[in-house]
Amino acid sequence: MSDLKAQFETAVADSKNLPDRPDNQTMLKMYALYKQATSGDASGMRPGFTDMVGRAKWDAWNEVKGTTADDAMKQYVSLIEDLKD
């Protein structure tokens, strides 16, 4: 396993034990970067307007479209490190 992959997996574990719950925008950013790193570009249909949470998550993920998995992992690790402070 690469160093980056190990750092990413550690950051994913650390994200569940942050000292404070991040605000919604930060949570969406975490979700988007995680999905981009693990699944690639957003796929499927955008959820309908009655599914506001699903729609917000899909939109956040779609905003990072084109980001490579490695870049998404690096950004995720960096974001979690900032939140741990």
Image: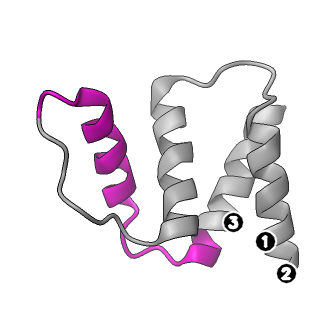
Q: Which residues are magenta?
A: 49-71
Query: What is the residue that sits farthest to the top in this orientation?
Result: 20
Indicate the position of residue 38 as horizontal and vertical percent values.
Answer: 57, 66
Residue in the picture at 45% in, 32% down: 25
CA–CA distance between discs 3 and 1?
Answer: 9 Å
Can residue 2 be seen here?
yes
As helix, strand or loop, the secondary structure at mark 3 comes to: helix
Q: Quadrant of the C terminus?
A: top right
Dot 2 and dot 1 residues touching (CB under 8 Å):
yes
As helix, strand or loop, the secondary structure at mark 2 comes to: loop
Q: Main secondary structure of the magenta part?
A: helix
The answer to which of marks 3 and 2 sits earlier in the sequence is 2
CA–CA distance between discs 3 and 2?
Answer: 12 Å
Numbered disc in front, either 3 or 2: 2
Queried whether the magenta region covers residue 69, the answer comes back as: yes
Name the amino acid type tagged 2. Answer: Ser
Q: Is residue 81 left or right of residue 63?
A: right
Q: On the image, numbered disc 2 is attached to which residue?
A: 2
Numbered disc in front, either 3 or 1: 1
Indicate the position of residue 30 as horizontal and vertical percent values.
Answer: 56, 45
Of residues 82 and 51, which is closer to you in this image? 51
Q: Is residue 24 left or right of residue 41?
A: right
Q: On the image, numbered disc 3 is attached to which residue?
A: 74
Residue in the picture at 73% in, 44% down: 80
18 over 76 or under it: above or below: above
Can residue 81 be seen here?
no
Of residues 22 and 17, which is closer to you in this image? 17
As helix, strand or loop, the secondary structure at mark 1 comes to: helix
Indicate the position of residue 46 as horizontal and vertical percent values.
Answer: 18, 51
Quadrant position of residue 74: bottom right
Q: Which mark is residue 5?
A: 1
